[in-house]
Amino acid sequence: MNVKLSAWVLSVVLCVLASGVKAQPLRFLTEHNPPGEYLDEQGEVSGVTASLVRVLQQRLEDPGSIELMPWGRALSIAKAEPDIVLFETVRTAEREPWFKWVGPLKHYQMALYGLKRRLGEASSLTELPGNYTACNYRNSATIDEIKALGFTEGKNLILTSKSGDCLEMLLLGRADLMAVSELSAHKFSANAAAAGNELVMLKYFSERKRYLAFSRNVSDERIARWQAALEQSYRDGTMRKLYQPVYSEQIIRRLEDFATQPKY
């Protein structure tokens, strides 16, 4: 084989390989977290965030299966395997190097809540660990903030494996405090009120942002296309149409404002 033919064959092989890499489908992992993600009556992953992801997949012509599983398992897979997208993932300093990030999908506040009948009118934060039991979702980014108040797993901190379990434990009297996001505060307050209780905020923690977390092997060009498509969905009203039935105007406006701000 002459040099020119060898070069041509090599170029064809490289093109085929590059095409194969580019076409590698992504595997999307999420958890049960309504109204963003849940299994519908047909056993399909549904919810407003899952619907937004599917819109982006269609616009980008970048399809991939969406699977729902426990968060701890999904996180382990996303950290270990290529071509994974984990959502909705809170972006923290610890997690920053694990993934490439597209978002935010949500921008909200986190706070510590409890039932008024259990806490009284004015409970001191310094007294809480000695008198009450806190509950939090295992693998949550809020665990460190709760532990910083003096709560310890196995002593006065219960960690659950399913989102939403802590409210049930509060209503049953098995826990006294829980971290609640701005996304869920209204629903949790309504559920507590229906059971004859009042959910009250004790301490503001911080603002949080949730993202699509891509495996590190995904190309920067692909990440940029996903970021651009997500922001376009904020500007053209697609996200608003999906989020408006379930999330507050303030949460929606934060995302729209982000999409219109200069990035450089």
Image: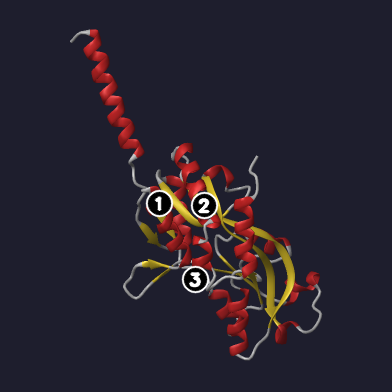
The mark nearer the N terminus, 3 or 2, is 3
- Residue 211: x and y in percent read 54, 54
The answer to whether 43 appears left or right of 179 in the picture is: left
Which of the two discs, 3 and 2, sits closer to the camera? 2
Q: Residue at x 34, y 46 (%)?
A: 25
Amino acid type assigned to the residue bearing label 3 in the image: Pro
The answer to whether 110 appears left or right of 38 in the picture is: right
Q: Nearer the viewer, residue 125 or 27?
A: 27
* Residue 59 badge: 1
Q: Secondary structure at mark 2?
A: helix
Q: Crowding near pointer 3: few (<14 within 10 Å), some, many (20+)?
A: some
The mark nearer the N terminus, 1 or 2, is 1
Q: Secondary structure at mark 3?
A: loop
In the rendered view, tell whether residue 59 sits above or below residue 158.
above
Amino acid type assigned to the residue bearing label 2 in the image: Gln
For marks 1 and 2, give the CA distance: 10 Å
Residue 173 visible to the viewer: no
Residue 5 visible to the viewer: yes
| Quadrant for the N terminus in the image | top left
Q: Crowding near pointer 1: few (<14 within 10 Å), some, many (20+)?
A: few
- Residue 141: x and y in percent read 60, 58
Which of the two discs, 3 and 1, sits closer to the camera? 1
Residue at the front extreme, as displayed: 236
Q: Residue at x 60, y 58 (%)?
A: 255
Q: Crowding near pointer 2: few (<14 within 10 Å), some, many (20+)?
A: some
Disc 2 target residue: 232
Disc 3 target residue: 35
